[in-house]
Structures are given as C-alpha cells and as structure tokens.
Amino acid sequence: MDGFVTWARIEPHAQTTDLDVGLAAEVADPLWLLLRQYQLGELTGDDAGSPVAVDVASSWSRFSRYRADGGDTPGEPQPITEHTGPLEQLVEGEPVIRLGADPRGTPWTAAVRAGRSLRRRLVAAGMGAVADRLATDAGTTFTADALADVVESVDDARYRALLANRTIDGAKVLTLLRGPGLPAAVVQGQDPDALATEVTAWGAGLEQDWGVSDAADDRFSPAWVRERLEYNFSIAAPPLPGDDAELVLSAPEYDGTGVEWYSLDRDVTPDVSLGTADDLAADPSLVGQRIRTLLPAPLTYPGMPADRFWEMEDAAVALGRVGAGPTDLSRMLAVDFAVVFSPDWFLVPVEVPVGCVARVDWVVVRDTFGGATLVGTTASQSADGVGRQFQPSNQVSSEGSGAEGDNPLLVVLSSAMSALSSDPREEVALQRDEVANLVWSIEKQVMGPTGRGITRPWFRSAFDLPDTHTADDFDLAWRLATPVAETWTPMVAVHEVDGPRLLRKARLLDTATTELRAAKSQLLADIQDVHEEEVTRAGIQLRILEQHTRGPDGRSYVWRGREKRPWKGEASSALRFDVATPREQT
C-alpha cells in the first residue's frame, strides 16, 4: 500500500545543535529546489483562507477618581479630568511653596520668581505703584536670612547679596493674603476689588504651577508613605458596559520611577468605591463601546524571516548566531517565534482613549473564502487566559476568598512617557553595615536654600584615626568612638512591642567637637520610622527630582517628586566604641 506525507510547514530542527544547518537551507541545483518546493506544497493550493477583515468590539471606561493613600487613613478622592495632567504629577507632586514658620520651607528661587510674576501682573493691570510698595515694605520684601542648619554654597551667598531687600517675596505675600491681608500702606489709593481680583488669580496660578502648602511640616506628597519610602495611591473608573462593579486600581508600592500598567493591582475588596457613580451621572461619555471593521496586517519587525521558505532574506540578521544556554528559556522562545510562528500573527489596531481601562468584547475574523470565525470573547478570554498579558493582577479580597471579577483588561494610563529630569536636588543612600549593626544614611546631595542641589562629598580620609597627643611613655590612646565621615548619619534598629522592627534616626557624637551631628537633607528630615525590611542588603537610593513633560494638548507640566531605587550593596564604616588604638596614626 502506497503512502505519502504532507508537510504544512518545515521547521529548522537538525540532528546537531547548530541552527545554521537548518536556517541555511543549502541546495545543490535549481531542479532540486523545484522538487523541494513541490514536495513542501508551495506549488499547490491550500484550503486555508487568509484573513481579509476583522470585526472588533471594544469597550472602555475612563479614570475619573484619584485617592492618595499615604497617610494612616485613606485620603479624600478627587476628580480626574482631561486637564489634570500626567498621573506622575498627580501622585508625586510636592508643594514647592510652603507657608509657615519654618524659614526653610520655600526655596529662595521660588519666592523670588513668585514675587516677580506678581509684579508683572500688577504692572500689566496698571497697579505698578502697588508693586513698588510691595518691593520696599519690610513685611513683603525678600530678605534671605542665613540659616545655621542649612548647607549653603557660594552661589547661595551670591543670590542673597544680589536680591535681598530688592524684590518681592511671593511666599510672604501669600502668607499675608491667607491671614490678615496686605498692609494698608501698600494698598492705599488702589481699588480693593480690582487688586483682590489680580492677587487671587495670581495665587491660583501659583497653586497650579508650583503647589502651595499651609502646613510647615508638609514636605511630601499626600501619597508618600514615610515608613515605606514609597507612594501609595488608588485610581478608579466607572463600571464597563454590562458590568456592575466599579474598577478600582491601587499601587501600594510605587517607587516614583514612572507609573506603568504593572504598577497597579485591581482592588477586589468588597464594596470598595471611590465614588465614580456621581462622575458617570454627570458625564456619560466616561464609558463607551465601539465596533469597527479593520484590515489585518502581518506582524513584522526589522530582520524578520521571510514568509516563504525559499526566499532571500536580509543578511544583516543571523538568527543562527543567537546564543542561548539550556536555561535561557525566554531567548529560545523568541528565536522559535521568529523562525517558525511569526508568519501566523496579524496586527489589528484598536483605538481607545488615553487614561482608561479597556476591554475587547469579541473578535470575528473573515477570510478570503467569505467565512466568519469567532476567535474570542470576553468570557472565553477570562476562562483560558488568552489576551491577558497586559492587565493588572488582582488583589485578594479582605475575606481571603481570592480574586473576584477576573476579566481580561487593558490599562491605558495617562503617564509621562518621556519626562525630562533635572539634576538631583537631593540624593541619599541607605546602606547596611552588618559589622556595626547599623544602617547608614549617606548624604550625597542636599537641597540648598535656593532649591538647588549642593554636593556633600566624603573621602576615605574622614575615617582615619586622628593623632592623639599624650605622654611619651604611653603607646595606646583610648577613644570613645572612631571617626565617621560627616555625611554619614546612623539609623538604629529597635524592637517595638506592638509592631515589627523599625529603623529610627539617631545622632552621632562628633568626638572632635563634642557636638551631636544630624542629617541636613529634607529627605531624612521627613523620615520618622522606617520598616527595617525596606532597607535590604542591596541598599536603596532616594532622590528628589524636578521633572518636565508635555501633555497631549502641548501644555507643559512641571513637578517635584521623589524616587526610590536599589543601590550598590552594603557599606563599611569600621565604627568602634570604647577602643584603644596606637597613639599616633599616619
């Protein structure tokens, strides 16, 4: 009985481990090539049809609520609109102008620039006389007193000498407006209603562009968790069409390096809500659904193998030269997809709004023979896991019953994709010292009074033992403690009765000056208690940065925020207490 074998595809598997043998497809003569094409079925028709059209039904729900969860209790939800700006600004943004008794609250540059913007507005409104009196009144003039506990640079001293007592201090003006009001000597002869209109609009602009805080100790975003050194926030969208549950996504451990879809988890706690029902009632366009017929295109990429086996390809790509070990599964899968399964994939674009949770309800593929095939629905995707590569994971409910409402969702965030970052305004490293049983907070950049970063370098010589002048008949000198660099501040681990071990700030006695040495940075000033597990053996790096990006409408957004990254490992200070060392050290 005669038999035959029909090959639907040829795969590059050889008896050796070298991929070049299969990928080269060497031929002896053209006749052999024609026979091989006939044998592989390239000269005959196939019953399979090619996709010519795809019908896609998609639905979406826009994010309409945001809540900062950095405090002991969740904050009040606030609305998200198309003019809110990128999500990173909403989460990370810290008030730059801080009103209160603390003179370190507002950087000098912010106070002066706010005063200059007020002067320009008053002059444009025909109130130049009021601006002149504000620049000379003692209660509204920029003074820039020297601060004993703040590190200053040469540029800071020049800034003070150039602008002190010569320009308006915007922070002082805002403090007066929220308190007793402007001095009578400043507003004399001016229409109070017109002046109030201008200064109110000026204050609203500062609130939007800079951020203004009334509390003297409010140095961080409401989403910043002091004990964890990271952000915690939630965003919510109304229910998708056909659903009843509000979509709440939370990011309990956002490190400030950019919000992505994988930064969020779906909160499935029963009865959790941020109040999006009111937003949907006021604006029904927050939720939508669309059915479109699209033309599928083959999924291609630079250097992709040709669809037909006997076709010349780009010589610049050599997939046979890709090295992969036995355990390098991801690279082996990528090569296998490139040389075998890539012609079977097609791309269909589906448009959804920015800043939403989207879902593909169903997909119907029509081929060249006129057949229509239902390839997937929401229910089938939820059951077999198809199409769920880019959805947030589900949090376990409070009862511990597991994930609920498991649907394949696509999160499209209004994130700052390519934000420009400034030089660090502050940079601090937290590193473990196992020998000394401490965690060292090492300051590399601290924020000066003008708001710019000041480098605080340290050198190995700072840890050398100083010479001790004693009697000639003594060879050893007793020391209370060995020296440590000035920028190193210890954090001591303690046990709490009702909680885990914490890391608390401590002060180090400077034996040379007999003074207690403390940290200078605002990052460390905000730290009270830090959970010990947050500082791993790799250490962490904390930075304050200013970032700039543009929205879809072309508007600029600038904000100051913090980020947390892994660092370089452990540190060694060689700190010892109650030690006798040689009298002279070189």
Image (cartoon, rainbow, N blue to C red):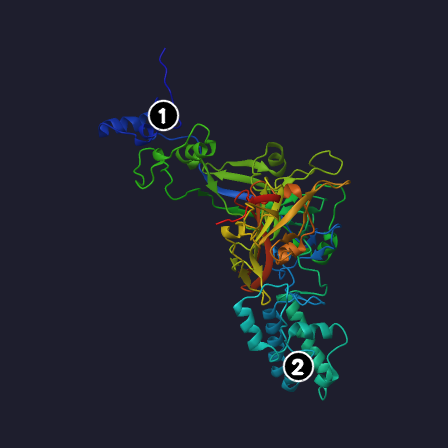
- 374, 442: nearer the viewer: 442
- 398, 427: nearer the viewer: 427
User: What residue did someone put label 1 on?
Assistant: 17
From the image, which quarter does the N terminus lie in? top left
Residue 157 in the image: state x and y as whole percent. 56, 71
Give the structural element (helix, strand or loop) at label 2.
Answer: helix
- 571, 30: nearer the viewer: 571
| Amino acid identity at mark 1 | Thr
The image quarter containing residue 574 is: top right
Give the structural element (helix, strand or loop) at label 1.
Answer: loop
Task: Specify which label sits upstream in the sequence, 2 or 1.
Answer: 1
User: What residue did someone put label 2 on?
Assistant: 134
Q: Residue at x 62, y 73 (%)?
A: 144
Residue 570 in the image: state x and y as whole percent. 55, 42
Query: In the current view of this chain or complex, which residue is farthest to the left?
Result: 29
Number of residues whose C-alpha sits closer than 10 Å to that of mark 2, classed few (under 14), some (14–19) or many (20 or more) = many
